[in-house]
Image: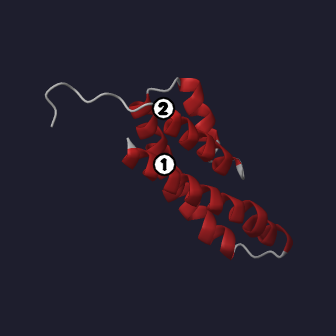
């Protein structure tokens, strides 16, 4: 489970950071300065690489933690709303940190 949490955390930070740069730097530059280079440089990796990896990391965590579907929808939406990815990531990690570890199966080394 720890590996899934680490993958989720990395993708939440990368996706959230790219989204903030995209929304508050790249898009205003494109609109007001008529310079779309940064929006292409940041937008394509965010939308075609990082967000899909964020979805995969979220799904992996959902499967391992056995969360309800509503919680996963909120986590997925956090990747498209600026600053929300960081808040949700903190909540998820704290919740999983407070959760007791499952017992090892009988006969496991």
The quarter of the picture where residue 44 lies is bottom right
- At horizontal 60% and vertical 71% (from top left) the residue drawn is 41
Residue 13 makes an appearance in the image:
yes
Please give the residue where the numbered disc 1 appears in the rendered image. Answer: 8
- At horizontal 59% and vertical 46% (from top left) the residue drawn is 89
Q: Quadrant of the N terminus?
A: top left
In the displayed structure image, the side of residue 39 where residue 63 appears, left or right: left
Q: Is residue 40 above or below residue 9?
A: below
The quarter of the picture where residue 34 lies is bottom right
State the residue lying farthest toward the right: 32
Q: Is residue 48 above or below residue 4?
A: below
The quarter of the picture where residue 20 lies is bottom right
Q: Is residue 29 above or below residue 101?
A: below
Disc nearer the start of the sequence (2/1): 1
Q: Is residue 100 above or below residue 25?
A: above
Disc assigned to residue 55: none
In the displayed structure image, the side of residue 66 where residue 22 appears, left or right: right
- At horizontal 69% and vertical 47% (from top left) the residue drawn is 84
Q: Quadrant of the C terminus?
A: top left
Give the spatial CA distance, label 2 vs label 1.
17 Å
Cβ–Cβ below 8 Å for labels 2 and 1? Answer: no
* Circle 2 crowding by C-alpha within 10 Å: few under 14, some 14–19, many from 20: few
Q: Residue 106: x, y in percent? A: 18, 24
In this figure, which colouring scheme has been used for the structure? secondary structure
Please give the residue where the numbered disc 2 appears in the rendered image. Answer: 99
Please tell me whether mark 1 sits on a helix, a strand or a loop: helix
For the residue pair 100 and 50, the one nearer the viewer reads as 100
Please tell me whether mark 2 sits on a helix, a strand or a loop: loop
- At horizontal 58% and vertical 29% (from top left) the residue drawn is 71
In the displayed structure image, the side of residue 51 where residue 32 appears, left or right: right
* Circle 1 crowding by C-alpha within 10 Å: few under 14, some 14–19, many from 20: many
């Amino acid at each position: 489970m720890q590996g899934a949490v680490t993958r989720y955390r990395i993708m939440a930070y990368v996706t959230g950071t790219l989204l903030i740069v995209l929304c508050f730097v790249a898009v205003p530059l494109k609109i007001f300065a008529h310079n779309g280079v940064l929006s292409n440089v940041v937008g394509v990796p965010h939308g075609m690489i990082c967000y899909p990896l964020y979805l995969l990391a979220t799904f992996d965590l959902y499967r391992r933690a056995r969360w309800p579907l509503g919680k996963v929808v909120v986590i997925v939406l956090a990747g498209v709303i600026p600053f929300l990815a960081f808040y949700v990531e903190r909540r998820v990690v704290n919740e999983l940190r407070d959760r007791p570890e499952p017992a090892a199966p009988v006969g496991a080394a």
